């Protein structure tokens, strides 16, 4: 059986072309929305919709990543609430680190167009 990548960038062809999503394919599996902005107020409003978020920044733009839904239970048994929160934060940091080269390419390509 083929091994799937841990993260996949997705765009819904039937939705808004500017909507970007990330799928995490390993437990805990989730779908996350991505907002790319340089407006802190807009980013905070976006992040307040989600229970788990991550960020990565390139130049003046930040990609905020918010988990829409976990398909698996993200809470590991035997961990304290703080350890569980730390585990989710670590997962979101890995997601943001994975998205950094994607953001860099998007920003650099956008600047090349001008």
Image (cartoon, rainbow, N blue to C red):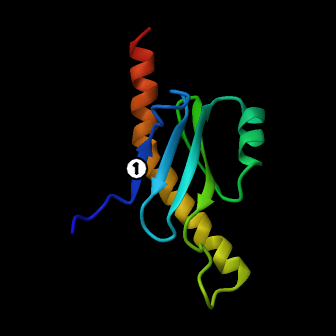
Residue 89 location (% of width, % of height): 61, 64
Residue found at the far left of this picture: 1
**Residue at figure coordinates x 41%, y 24% from the top left:** 108
Residue 34 location, quadrant: top right
Q: Which residue in the protein does label 1 denote?
A: 8
Quick check: 22 left or right of 36?
left
User: Which is nearer the eye, 13 or 35?
Assistant: 13
Q: Quadrant of the N terminus?
A: bottom left
**Residue at figure coordinates x 71%, y 38% from the top left:** 43
Residue found at the far front of this picture: 14
**Residue at figure coordinates x 59%, y 74% from the top left:** 73
Residue 9 location (% of width, % of height): 42, 44
Residue 28 location (% of width, % of height): 52, 69
Residue 26 location, quadrant: bottom left
Residue 102 location, quadrant: top left
Image height of 110 relative to 74, above or below: above
User: Which is nearer the eye, 15 or 104?
Assistant: 15
Quick check: 53 left or right of 95?
right
Q: Quadrant of the C terminus?
A: top left
């Amino acid at each position: 059986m083929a091994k799937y990548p841990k993260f996949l960038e997705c765009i819904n062809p039937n939705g808004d072309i500017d909507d970007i999503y990330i799928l995490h394919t390993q437990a805990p599996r989730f779908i996350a929305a991505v907002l790319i902005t340089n407006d802190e107020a807009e980013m905070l409003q976006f992040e307040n919709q989600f229970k788990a978020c991550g960020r990565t920044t390139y130049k003046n733009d930040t990609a905020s990543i918010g988990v829409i839904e976990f398909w698996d239970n993200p809470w590991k048994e035997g961990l304290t609430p703080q350890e569980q929160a730390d585990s989710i934060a670590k997962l979101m940091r890995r997601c943001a680190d994975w998205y950094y080269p994607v953001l860099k390419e998007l920003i650099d390509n956008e600047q090349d167009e001008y």
